[in-house]
């Protein structure tokens, strides 16, 4: 039999076992170890939760800082930032009336508080220079500024109902406009610009300007972004993938889309260019139906010929064949197509002859600058200066064979008087909103 060691006792079998007190102590150690493990796991979960919460708060701060700065692109192309940063430093938040307030914006104030005294003094000097430049602009363009105020006031009066004129959508809120109908508002976050493009009103050249500002198109000859709007191929700028429009916001920002639209509309400089409505229609017809255009022939020209041209069912399938046979839509057929209620029952007006108030929603969007094609050169120069980008680019030269207002009588000579008046009623909101005179020479002869 084995000897009993000190501190041990024999059980009934004769085996040496540890005393009961030690057993209890061992059990307590095990419980404490298990409790320690549980407490450690709990503490780990608490630490993970706290760290996760802090991380989420940081993400929210970073995200809303991006929204406040109105630059929601998280990964900008750094190699294309030279022109953008140069232009952005000179960019105004809205028109001349808001240039001075831009110097005291939260972004500028934040920069000043986080800079050294020397940098802060430099920023203050830059702000003073901006104020002086804005005053210079007021002195340099007094007539243009007054004209802009008159154009904006005109829109406000018509939209408020002072002119006792009503039209579809006049009183609805921006949130009530379907997002798909906001597809003509192009957004440039880098320069805080919103441009509503109107086809047949210099939109190709303004899109070329935006392509240069956003540096979204690479020149094959240089391998670098275009720097001259005149050099940008006009057929490429209508590629919808080059421009961010409000209609794309849902795909990019989901449920935040409407909120972001409202923020950008409040802060960004918004502009559009307009044109005499009847002259714009003549220009659209000349461009799309006086020469072979396969897409417009198939979608619209062939429909006009069948409905109003007494053309048999064996109508040529292509524009080239139809034009070769001397068959093409007339301006009278085009006007009949616009006035036919059946036209919009099937599909909404094409953008080239859709009314401007339906493209750009001037009663819901408070535009800072309203340009006119009739004064394109002066208005473009004025706008580029207001945007502080005139030192980096110039507006491309316009078309030489532009449709003129003096052509209206000749073009409408073969249109019955009743149809002329119906057409005026259809486009009357554009005449009234943008201050174009009633074409009495067309409506009373």
Image: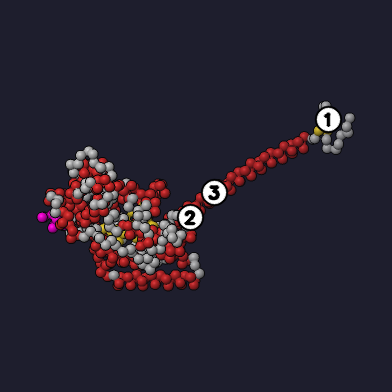
Quarter of the image that includes the N terminus: top right
The numbered disc on residue 52 is 3
Q: Is residue 440 magenta?
A: yes
Residue drawn at 48 percent across, 55 percent down: 75
Q: Measure the alpha-carbon separation of dots 1 and 2.
A: 75 Å
Q: Is residue 182 left or right of residue 419?
A: right
Of 374 and 334, the residue lying toward us: 334
Name the colouring of the figure.
secondary structure
The numbered disc on residue 15 is 1
Helix, strand or loop at label 3? It is helix
Task: State which tag comes first along the sequence, 1 or 2.
Answer: 1
Residue drawn at 40 percent across, 47 percent down: 251
Residues rendered magenta in the picture:
439-445
Task: State which tag comes first along the sequence, 3 or 2.
Answer: 3
Quarter of the image that includes the C terminus: bottom left
Of 151 and 188, the residue lying toward us: 188
Q: Relative to 23, say whether 336 is above or below.
A: below
Kindly tell me whether residue 421 is visible in this rendering: no
Residue drawn at 25 percent across, 42 percent down: 316
Q: Is residue 72 left or right of residue 202?
A: right
The numbered disc on residue 65 is none
**Residue 120 x/y as whole percent:** 47, 70
Task: State which tag comes first along the sequence, 1 or 3.
Answer: 1
Q: Is residue 436 magenta?
A: no
Q: Neighbour class for label 1 at 10 Å: few (<14), some, many (≥20)? A: few
Kindly tell me whether residue 73 is visible in this rendering: yes
Helix, strand or loop at label 1? It is loop
Residue drawn at 39 percent across, 49 percent down: 249
């Amino acid at each position: 039999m084995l000897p009993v060691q000190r501190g041990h006792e024999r059980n009934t079998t004769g085996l040496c076992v540890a005393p009961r007190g030690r057993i209890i102590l061992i059990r307590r150690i095990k419980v404490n170890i298990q409790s320690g493990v549980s407490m450690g796991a709990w503490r780990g979960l608490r630490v993970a939760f706290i760290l996760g919460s802090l991380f989420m708060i940081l993400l929210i701060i970073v995200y809303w800082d991006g929204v406040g700065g109105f630059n929601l692109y998280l990964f900008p192309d750094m190699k294309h930032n030279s022109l953008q940063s140069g232009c952005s430093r000179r960019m105004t938040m809205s028109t001349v009336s808001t240039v001075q307030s831009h110097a005291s914006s939260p972004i500028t104030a934040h920069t000043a508080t986080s800079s050294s005294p020397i940098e802060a003094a430099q920023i203050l000097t830059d702000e003073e220079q901006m104020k002086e430049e804005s005053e210079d602009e007021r002195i340099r363009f007094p007539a243009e500024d007054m004209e802009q105020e008159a154009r904006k006031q005109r829109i406000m009066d018509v939209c408020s109902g002072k002119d006792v004129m009503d039209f579809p959508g006049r009183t609805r809120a921006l949130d009530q406009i379907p997002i798909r109908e906001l597809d003509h508002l192009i957004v440039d976050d880098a320069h805080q610009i919103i441009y509503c493009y109107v086809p047949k009103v210099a939109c190709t050249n303004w899109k070329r300007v935006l392509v240069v500002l956003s540096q979204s198109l690479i020149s094959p000859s240089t391998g670098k972004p275009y720097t001259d709007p005149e050099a940008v191929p006009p057929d490429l700028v209508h590629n919808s993938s080059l421009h961010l429009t409000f209609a794309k916001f849902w795909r990019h920002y989901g449920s935040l889309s409407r909120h972001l639209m409202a923020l950008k509309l409040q802060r960004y400089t918004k502009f559009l260019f307009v044109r005499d409505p009847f002259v714009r229609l003549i220009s659209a017809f000349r461009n799309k139906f006086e020469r072979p255009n396969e897409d417009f022939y198939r979608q619209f020209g062939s429909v006009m010929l069948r409905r109003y041209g007494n053309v048999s069912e064996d109508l040529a399938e292509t524009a080239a064949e139809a034009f070769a046979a001397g068959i093409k839509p007339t301006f009278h057929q085009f006007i009949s197509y616009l006035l036919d209620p059946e036209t919009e029952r099937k599909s909404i007006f094409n953008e080239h002859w859709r009314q401007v108030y339906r493209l750009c929603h001037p009663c819901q969007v408070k535009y800072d600058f309203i340009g006119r094609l009739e004064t394109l050169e002066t208005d473009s120069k004025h706008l580029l200066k207001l945007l502080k980008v005139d030192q980096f680019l110039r507006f491309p030269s316009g078309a030489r064979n532009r449709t003129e207002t003096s052509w209206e009588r000749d073009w409408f000579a073969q249109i019955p008087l009743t149809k002329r008046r119906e057409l005026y009623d259809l486009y009357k909101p554009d005449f009234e909103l943008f201050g174009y005179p009633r074409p009495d020479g067309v409506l009373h002869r």
